Amino acid sequence: MPTTATMATRTDALRMDDPTWWRQASVYQIYPRSFADSNGDGMGDINGITAKVPYLRELGIDAVWLSPFYPSALADGGYDVDDYRNVDPRLGTLEDFDAMAKALHDAGIKLIVDIVPNHSSDRHEWFREALAAPRGSAARDRYVFRDGLGENGELPPSDWVSVFGGPAWERITEPDGTPGQWYMHIFAKEQPDFNWDNREVREDFLSTLRFWSDRGVDGFRIDVAHALTKNLEETLPTTADLEAQGEALYLEGRHPYWDRDEVHEIYAEWRRLFNEYTPPRTAVAEAWVHADRRARYASPEGLGQAFNFDLLQADFDAAQFRTIITKNLAEAEASGASSTWVFSNHDVVRHATRYGLPASEDSAEGIMAGQAGKQWLLAGGRQEDVDVELGLRRARAASLLMFALPGSAYLYQGEELGLQEVGCEIPDSERQDPAFFRNKGVDIGRDGCRVPLPWTSGGASFGFGAGASHLPQPAWFTGSSVEAQEGQVGSTLSLYRRAMALRSQLQTAEALEWLDTGRDDVVAFRRPNGWTSVTNFGTEAFELPAGEVLVSSSPLEAGSLPGAATAWLR
Ligand code: NOJ
């Protein structure tokens, strides 16, 4: 049995130094608390990841993106960071982190870590200092503090609503015990926003980026990259004022805190730092901005790449896919970046479930879990209406199509097992997401895609760890486990492994050429090296053109591609 270290090939060794490695990479997102638990405390950890490096290696991915693993009270699943330059003791130590990075690198896998620059946690040393310091002090200036409105400052500075529901301002008690100023939090109240006009804040993040870069981290995923800079003039506009301005507010970069032009000065400074390293450190922006403004985040002078969530928000529909792919490839070319593709992550309902729901009126609203009346909703539909088989079939077809596209493919842990979203199986008493608590009765939250992975078909927490798991796993996980799918022809795990292995041989940066299939519901494109991908979005079988079939997401029917399936030919 080769060790992880000896498994790395010469090709890997060459790629590790390649400054363009990220352009066509397959990146696997790990939500560390739910991946693998090495010490049986119910929470996934760093050593758990290290132990699974052979699995990641066999999956054939190029890089791992690690969601936050920093010390945190977990008010928002770790996106509330207490200390940006440390590891949560429940997850391990810095030495464990170094060992994990080494194991990944030895296996030819790059490491991207999540950076959360818009807000810290309210337990961060700086925030505690700010609370203890007086109004107008340097300590308060690192965050966004303002006096309240009303006679005694008893009203929040504006009526803005936080992303997780409820007010975006929280009032503090001053050190002398009197009711005091308010601080802004776009997310939960445990996540105070930093003031990015403050030079100390900027310097501190440069130190953090250097800290991880020096430790061998290859790149960064930037959390809410479009929120950092703010325009908080004397009189803040009301929500109604903002709404009245419509799309122009966003297109012209005039929103007080979303996607302001000044944010790019920050990323230009970060880029200079990234380029001091060999190979340069990479970055990908999580920026939910108007599609016309996304390229700014992906420019070579900025972060270099930005997530494109367009396919994630689309229906399983040939015309929508084709339009989105064409537009994004053109956009990436114009900005000098490479395109990114993603169907699932830790914030949205898993795509195997989304695609199993009856068509929704508004697909953009339909990526989150929610609630209407007394009914929990997954991506706009009822859990009992999910056609599990159809959802999985379509998810496999969509993912295989994605792997054939030029650009980077971002995968979320568990999608290679075809996992469905866990819905009402999680009792309210065990939910963790602040979106559930702050939005009671409206939002079921994001816990359903964060349930720990099933590694074995039975046993304690399906092989996740030696004990229970921090979120309950449903009984149906047994058939989706790695053990159940390992070596099984036709399993989703086998499909992903085959697709990834082929992709690493066939993938090039060159553009694709659309092929005329004679059908509106069948999409096909050829890559310059003679590799063709065909997806049948419809229900009627499609006769494939001549060629060797390399892989298909569902078995062919007498040489034809059945509905909701993708095949690659050469
Ligand atoms: C985006 C992250 O993906 C999400 O999980 C988090 O809740 C918010 N940013 C706030 O950090």
Image (spheres, helix red, strand yellow):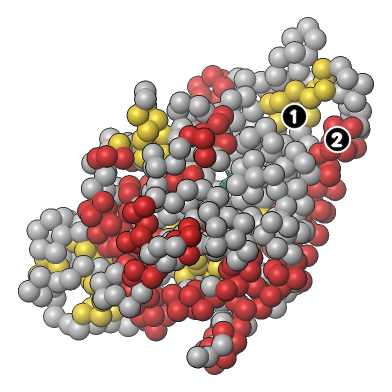
Q: Amino acid at mark 1?
A: Tyr
- Is residue 78 among the parts visible in the rendering? yes
Q: Residue at x 77, y 41 (%)?
A: 123
Q: Is residue 237 left or right of residue 458?
A: right
Q: Position of residue 488 (x, y in %)?
A: 29, 75
Q: Are marks 1 and 2 in contact (CB under 8 Å)?
A: yes
Q: Residue at x 75, y 29 (%)?
A: 183
At label 1, counting other C-alpha atoms closer than 10 Å, the crowd grade (few under 14, some 14-19, many 20 or more) is many
Q: Which label sits on residue 393?
A: none
Query: Helix, strand or loop at disc 1?
Result: strand
Name the residue: 25% across, 80% down: 550
Quadrant of image for the C terminus: bottom left
The foreground one among 565 and 309 is: 565
Instruction: Measure the C-alpha gap from mark 1 to mark 2.
Output: 10 Å
In x, y percent, where is residue 223? 61, 50
The quadrant of the picture showing ligand 1 is top right
Residue position marked by numbered label 2 in the rendering: 130
Q: Determine whether, in the image, residue 382 is placed left or right of residue 77.
A: left
User: From the viewer's perspective, is residue 74 above or below residue 163?
Assistant: below
Tag on residue 183? Answer: 1
Q: Residues within 10 Å of mark 2 (few under 14, many from 20)?
A: many
Give how far across and how far down residue 15 sits, in percent.
56, 83
| Closer to us: 291 or 425 | 425
